[in-house]
Image (cartoon, helix red, strand yellow):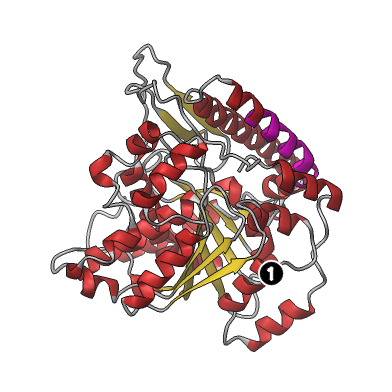
Amino acid sequence: MQSQILPVTNPFLSPPSSSSMLLGSKDDLYSTRLLIDDDNNKKTETKPFLSRASSYHTTSPTATSNNNKNKGSKFYRVWRRRSNSETSLSSLTGADRTNSLREDVEHVAADTALITRLSFNLLRFLGVGYRWIGRFLALGCYSFLLFPGFLQVGYYYFFSRRVRRGIVYGDQPRNRLDLYLPQNNDGDGPKPVVAFVTGGAWIIGYKAWGSLLGQQLSDSDVIVACIDYRNFPQGTISDMVNDASQGISFVCNNIAEYGGDPNRIYLMGQSAGAHIAACTLIEQAIKESGERESTSWSLSQIKAYFGLSGGYNLLNLVDHFHSRGLYRSLFVSIMEGEQSLRRFSPEVIVQDPNMRNTVSLLPPVILFHGTADYSIPSDASKSFTETLQGLGVKAESILYEGKTHTDLFLQDPMRGGKDDMFEDLVAFIHAGDSEALARHAAAPPRKRLVPEFMLKLAHDVSPF
């Protein structure tokens, strides 16, 4: 029996119009909180994390004259950098260290609450038939089998000094990102950067889902920025694309402050995140090809796009998703109606004859996919690659025989040692840097996080 995809909805339920979700903070550094209105139309007044000025602006909001504008700008940049570094355990002693640990514990509790609420948010859309009983049992078994790995990755995410959590990049709910920094981030010059958009079927995406990839790449001298974004029903696909674009803008304009190389930024997405990231690239190309469009970042800053297990033609996938449990009624709502399926299908949009100049602005595209992926068939990546190649875009698809939707992203990395997809990814990122490649080749094998028999069982019972 083929495994089934998890995120689904009851086709007879319509998306709640009054529900809202807001991720705020106690001190804008840690201790996030989540507010979700009930279905009784209760209104909650909230304030944005930042002023209406976007995070990538470098001028100080308190600078009131031309004479002190530059000075205020410098102060603002220094303050922001310190606010994300001085809270690390390495800079604290005594009572301050105890306070920092307390804040970390509060952050763990807040993130756990967020993940729990995301899960309940998903449950609101699920049917209760026998099909879902089997799938939830499979999900429970899958999670149990990988729990030893989840526990270790979670500990690293919450307590590692190399992780900068919850950096604000915009003034909308969930406009935060996590940074994963290499061990020797202060030496050997600026590091290459991967801006990563996590998956989650457009419903349960969360920045922490990229913690395993962030840990691995940072161990290979790569800075990783995991971008969070609004999910459905808090937002629809346009909101997700806008959030991703703002997150990319923050990375492009601020990553040098964290030791990153603004000339070596790669964009990557996984599953639904791959689709969102590809849509973001297309919309940015449309803006840049327009005569009067102003933008806060440029496609010329993106060296390449990596898509992992993504879907790029919704017209071909909507029925497949429906058969897998992501019902058409829900999916169409996420994508803002039937008429928008074409607009948010990158493979379809690029074939428009009026898009020739726009397509020429796209960076190189490399798509990774497993041939045993039942959630999003590998043909999705093959077809998009062939379409781009026919339009003159440098594109390549790399298929991994027998790999499922989660093998490449979870099971294989938890196996330890070296895995093919990760080695291919590092080879692309460090291409031309012989020293970095030599250090990666000489690095000790990554440790195993989960016993082999449990990984094989997880592969067999995975509902994705």
Q: Which residue is mark 1?
A: 420
Whether residue 89 sits left or right of residue 388 in the image: it is right
Task: Evaluate whether residue 451 shows in this view.
Answer: no
Label 1: state its secondary structure: helix
Task: Evaluate whether residue 89 shows in this view.
Answer: yes
Instruction: Indicate the quadrant containing the C terminus: top left, top right, bottom left or bottom right.
Output: top right
Residue positioned most to the front: 1
Query: Alpha-carbon neighbours of circle 1 within 10 Å: few (<14), some, or many (≥20)?
Result: few
Residue sitting at x 63%, y 24%: 133
Could you say which quadrant of the image residue 96 lies in? top right
Q: Nearer the viewer, residue 205 or 75?
A: 205
Residue 210 falls within the magenta-colored stretch: no
The relative height of residue 377 versus residue 337 in the rendered view (above or below) is below
The relative height of residue 254 versus residue 111 in the rendered view (above or below) is below
Residue positioned most to the top: 40
The rendered magenta stretch, by its main secondary structure, is classed as helix
Residue range (magenta): 135-151
Q: Nearer the viewer, residue 273 or 37?
A: 273
In percent of width and height, residue 254 lies at 44, 64
In percent of width and height, residue 366 lies at 49, 71
Whether residue 55 sits left or right of residue 339 in the image: it is right
Q: Nearer the viewer, residue 249 or 40?
A: 40
Residue positioned most to the left: 291
Could you say which quadrant of the image residue 155 lies in? top right
Residue sitting at x 63%, y 65%: 400
Whether residue 155 sits left or right of residue 225 in the image: it is right
In percent of width and height, residue 12 lies at 39, 21
Whether residue 163 sits left or right of residue 55 in the image: it is right
Q: Amino acid at mark 1?
A: Asp
Q: Nearer the viewer, residue 37 or 399?
A: 399
Residue sitting at x 64%, y 70%: 185
